[in-house]
Image (cartoon, rainbow, N blue to C red):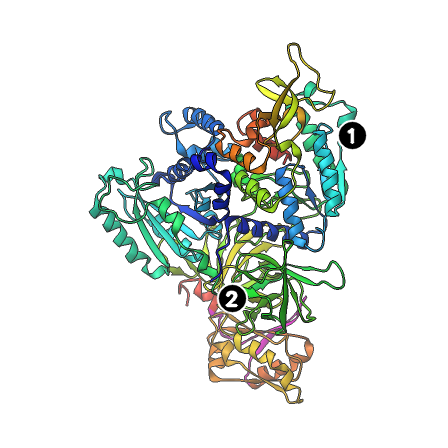
Amino acid sequence: MSKNLTHLQQLEAESIHIIREVASEFGNPVMLYSIGKDSAVMLHLARKAFYPAPPPFPLMHVDTTWKFREMIEFRDKMAAECGLDLIVHVNEEGVRQGISPFTHGSSLYTDIMKTEGLKQALDRYKFDAAFGGARRDEEKSRAKERIFSFRSANHRWDPKLQRPELWNLYNTRIKPGESIRVFPISNWTELDVWQYIHLEDIPIVPLYFAAVRPVVERDGMLIMVDDERLELKPGETVQYKSVRFRTLGCYPLTAAVESEATTLPQIIQEMLLTRTSERQGRLIDHDSAGSMEKKKQEGYF
Amino acid sequence: MAHQSELIEDDILAYLKSHEEKTMLRFITCGSVDDGKSTLIGRLLWDSKMVFEDQLESLEADSKKVGTQGGAIDYALLLDGLQAEREQGITIDVAYRYFSTEKRKFIVADTPGHEQYTRNMITGASTAQVAIILVDARKGLLTQTRRHSYLVSLVGIKHIVLAVNKMDLIDFNQEKFEAIRNDYEQFAASLGFGDITAIPLSALGGDNMIEPSANTPWYEGPTLMNYLENVPVAGDSRAEQFRMPVQWVNRPHLDFRGFCGTIASGTIRQGDELRVAASGQMGRVARIVTMNGDLPEATAGQAITLTLEDEIDISRGDMLSSPDAPPTYARHPEAHLVWMHDEPLQPGQIYLVKTATAVTPGRVTAVQYAVDVNTLEQKQVPTLKLNEIGVARLELDRPISFDPYRQNRHTGSFILIDRFSNATVAAGMIIGTTPMESPLTAKRAERSDSDSGLPKRINLSEAAAGSAGVSVVDLTGEWGALEFDVSTSFLDYLGKGNRILFRLRDVEQLQAVALLAYDHTLSFEFDRTTEGVSILLFMRGIRSGSRLSGDDGIGI
């Protein structure tokens, strides 16, 4: 008898199955690409699913205009390398109103630039399915999230309207205007993602690796000074430290960790020995209990 | 998180290498809060060090605020999800938890115990390979133990852990444990499990969870973690016949035509011969293509792309199989249905039937019986309501390829979708074809031999062997002239008030049915439907037997 499938082989196969099912059953799918490590794995799986053809859907990035510069460079390079159309959507209304994480608070800012921006983009291009790189182990409220998550015409997520998911048979039926968010790596953990990146040699944004970077200490977190828009508060000074990021988002909202890990094995080693979960570095999760759930109901990923 | 700290610190590459070889196990836990189910799962997560410091902080805070352990750590709160549920003190769905050890990654389907239980448990169990059935050592087997066991067996789980929990409350008494185990083995003998492993536990105290407990020196079996890490499951679908539903046809350019899908069972190698289940066409595997290079072989569970040496017409919805053992290809499956929606089943109404290969419109023609999940008794019912389970006959608009669920969980399962609300209303597990269909499909296959101009003879006694109510004779696959062979059993069947529904390809076939009615003094009703013509044949003056069955004999 041949060798047993490893857990990564099984996870990979499940994800590829899901991605192919969406391509088969939806008229206008899109892959939401957040440029982070989970997106990197998702994109890699999509390439494997359709090899030797490129994936039959575009990538879309909802750009808040506050992403790390290295993320944007990486995004453009990857899309070109994979032969995929890249749609970049910015909430121009938010830009006109001058919405920024500094002046409007993380919650309102995220709502307008990310959640609203995403809804605008989905409406504008009339996508009926959108892949996202969320995982169930990230946060408690996601443990019950479906792989095919149903959204009403106004993008609301209603726990009561979610469909039971049996075997690997996914109900993809929707009415005009409704859509489905699909999470092909739902069953992956943070460790699985890193191990797979290591094993398959998947390119990731250099920010995940430690390097000396300019940071300020703010509310107990290290925030990188990625451009001149970060204004120093009284008493703050720019320090140069060897830091890296466990999760990537908008630079003013993403805390760096001090680290010397410059290789993937070192990153994994550090992750395994650490005592806090990865979302701890995201400021928006600290708002209130059940905050992710509220955001999800409103249409945030 | 700090598991295997030493190896991680000393030699991360060796650690990574060892973890590349890990396998995966999906299991479900069945029991109520009272059995200590959430504590058991919380404990597994806890003991495998999958709880982070920030999660621990919120766990401590939550335990003080809403916990049920008087401010001490309430492991159950690790498992809570949605805020609304937490406030109501109930959970309403299936939640998935993850932990891993050196040997395996685990996915736990956690289902709550209340009135939605059947629906949620079937959902969680559908992807599980092992079920942990929790029993309170003080109470022994309960009605719910039987219910859980039946549902788990229905979904085809072969490996059972009987987790006899709260052993501390019966002083780790060996006789009581063995009595429960014997009771269970006796009860479960008819359910067809592969193996049953009973473990004396205290989830709260950690006895026999990870390490063998000093409190049960008489117990020589595995601890729970030990069992989960070692139970062999990979062979379950590997040795079977090859099946691959085609999910996607990959045509980047004219010189490449790849058939993509997930192997449902069996193994395929380069050069192997394949059969397209529906058309019977044969082909030979040229390549198994992946981005990391061609594979010499691929096996159950892998998502692959095949190219063939031959030009064969294959599309999404086809099933590829080994040449000598194709799946059934038919329109009338009989299946277990688990009803999952507030709106009850409407027999006769069109639903969408989604199987591994295709989405096909179809209807439930008859509910044979429902099963009481508590007593396992069969009862006659006109329909199925939320959380009810029954055996039903389906009629699909087109034939599909399938296997009995008992033989293959992937090619024997389906979901029913409401065409208007798009809700998933039921889960189905195919038992086989309905008794009257097989000979007709066999005849249809012989069609090419019967182009002699002579009328095709259709034997109707098989239709009469069907269950009470309405039997269906499908003539839509027949192209030539028809004659019917009529037996006394056929006339007896109609004489009891049963009816035969003929599905005709077109109105030309009506003459044969009309002659049949004329010869045997029968009546019929004519209907023009969207799919063609249907004729309901019956004996006038006889009350319909099927309507009586629901009346329990009153008024006969």
Q: Amino acid at mark 1?
A: Glu
Q: Where's residue A103, x and y in %? A: 70, 18
Give the left or right position of residue B174, taking residue A237 as reference: left
Q: Which residue is mark 2?
A: B403
What secondary structure is found at the residue carrying circle 1? helix
Q: How far apart are the two marked residues, 1 and 2, measured between alpha carbons?
A: 54 Å
Vertical comparison of B55 with A60: above or below: above
Q: Where's residue B297, x and y in %? A: 56, 62
Q: Where's residue B49, x and y in %? A: 43, 35
Which residue is more in the foreground, B268 or B18?
Answer: B18
Q: Amino acid at mark 2?
A: Asp
Labels 1 and 2 touching (C-beta < 8 A): no
Vertical comparison of B123 with B480: above or below: above
State which region is magenta.
B520-545
Task: Tell me if mark 2 has few (under 14), some (14-19) or many (20+) residues whose alpha carbon lies within 10 angstroms of its own.
Answer: many
Residue A12 in sight here: yes
Quadrant hosting residue B416: bottom right
What label does residue A68 carry, if any?
Answer: none
Task: Tell me if mark 1 has few (under 14), some (14-19) or many (20+) residues whose alpha carbon lies within 10 angstroms of its own.
Answer: few
Residue at the far top in the pictured view: A234
Q: Which residue is mark 1?
A: A92
Vertical comparison of B299 with A116: above or below: below
Q: Where's residue B292, x and y in %? A: 63, 53
Residue A283 in sight here: no
Quick one: quadrant of the C terminus of chain B? Answer: bottom left
What secondary structure is found at the residue carrying circle 2? loop
Quadrant hosting residue A206: top right
Quadrant hosting residue B247: bottom right
Q: Give the chain letter at badge 2.
A: B
